[in-house]
Amino acid sequence: MSSSEVIDWDEAMQQCGEDEEFLRELLADLRSETDTQMAKIEETIRNPTDSPFIQIMRASHVIKGAASNLMCAQLRHSAMNLESAASAAANDSNGVSNP
């Protein structure tokens, strides 16, 4: 997979038993789930609660997992970075030091 590919299509097809229709359905589900989680993140930023970083961390974790399952490395990497940053911020706001 080159750094410019959004999805490792060959690997994703293998994961789906070479069923392209099924893969496309899963990718549509990924998009829907990503949209849902991004809306949660946006709402948290607009209207923070007592634990906004935890909510952002959870939403980005969901995106990371879904992207990983479908061989979407760029999305997985971005979600992982956001999850890590939110986790660090949550720990900092709670007075917990990061290793």
Image: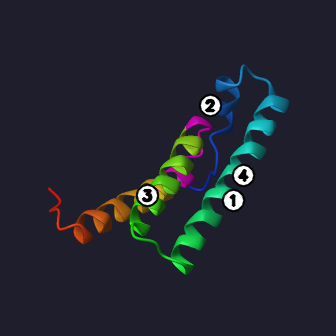
Q: Is residue 94 magenta?
A: no
Q: Residue at x 62, y 51 (%)?
A: 5
Amino acid type, callout 1: Asp
- Counting residues from the start of the chain, the first of labels 1 and 3 encountered is 1
Q: Are marks 1 and 2 in contact (CB under 8 Å)?
A: no
Left or right: 66 with respect to 99?
right
Kindly state the secondary structure of the residue where label 2 is placed: helix
Amino acid type, callout 3: Met
- Counting residues from the start of the chain, the first of labels 3 and 2 encountered is 2
Q: Residue tagged by mark 4?
A: 31
Left or right: 18 with respect to 6?
right
Q: Residues within 10 Å of mark 1 (few under 14, many from 20)?
A: few
Q: Residue at x 60, y 64 (%)?
A: 40
- Counting residues from the start of the chain, the first of labels 2 and 4 encountered is 2
Q: Residues within 10 Å of mark 3 (few under 14, many from 20)?
A: many
Q: Residue tagged by mark 2?
A: 11
Q: CA distance from mark 2 to mark 4?
A: 19 Å
Q: Are marks 2 and 4 in contact (CB under 8 Å)?
A: no
Q: Which residues are magenta?
A: 69-77
Q: Are marks 1 and 3 in contact (CB under 8 Å)?
A: no
Amino acid type, callout 2: Glu
Q: CA distance from mark 3 to mark 2?
A: 27 Å
> x, y percentage for residue 1?
57, 43
Q: CA distance from mark 1 to mark 2?
A: 24 Å
Please tell me the numbered disc located at residue 57. Answer: 3
Q: Is residue 82 above or below residue 14?
A: below
Amino acid type, callout 4: Arg
Kindly state the secondary structure of the residue where label 3 is placed: helix
Q: Determine the image quadrant of residue 67.
A: top right
Please tell me the numbered disc located at residue 35. Answer: 1
- Counting residues from the start of the chain, the first of labels 1 and 2 encountered is 2
Residue placed farthest to the bottom in the image?
46
